[in-house]
Amino acid sequence: MYDHLETEARKIGLLVNERKTKYMFMIAAGNMRKPHNLRIGNKEFEGVSEFKYLGNILENNNRNDGCIKERIQTGNKAYYANLQMLKSKVISRGSKLQIYKTLIRPVATYGAETWTLTAAEENAEEV
């Protein structure tokens, strides 16, 4: 499959950079999750247990808790970056709600539609 990908990529002028390309093997068995390097032909790709893709942290154990914690932290940063406007007496409540909806909530919920939550994660309350 990799050889086919590399052949098709070369047709349009793209090269696969083995230093930048990593892979992650996902399996239910815990003892098989340890990352190891993968050799295909004369190229070797680094195996990883987690990586960041489009702003979300993907883990080889199919857990989302790291990604969720990071989103909460990023949402808090967005909130505190806009705190002066949110506390202002000059800005109306409706404008503050609009600031929340456009600047804070999207940052905190980015990628949330792809998360698969366990029952414990769904019922967890942030303190």
Image: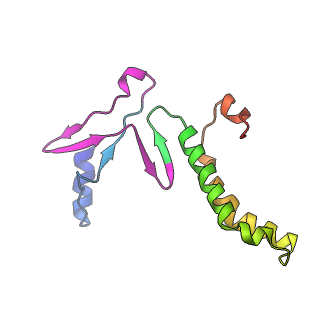
Please tell me which residue is depicted at 23% across the width and 51% down the height of the picture.
Answer: 18
**Is residue 31 on the magenta stretch?**
yes
Query: Picture coordinates of residue 32 (x, y %)?
Result: 36, 24
**The one of 58 and 108 positioned closer to us in this rendering:** 108
**The one of 78 and 27 positioned closer to us in this rendering:** 78
Please tell me which residue is depicted at 81% across the width and 66% down the height of the picture.
Answer: 97
Magenta region, residue range: 27-56
Q: Is residue 94 above or below residue 8?
A: below
Please tell me which residue is depicted at 28% across the width and 51% down the height of the picture.
Answer: 5
Query: Picture coordinates of residue 94 (x, y %)?
Result: 85, 71
**The one of 121 and 27 positioned closer to us in this rendering:** 121
Q: Which residue, as the protein is rendered here, is positioned at the far left?
A: 42
Q: Looking at the figure, which quarter contains the N terminus?
A: top left
Q: How many marks?
A: 0
Q: Is residue 60 above or below residue 4?
A: above
Q: Which residue, as the protein is rendered here, is positioned at the far bottom?
A: 90
**Is residue 2 on the magenta stretch?**
no
Q: Looking at the figure, which quarter contains the C terminus?
A: top right
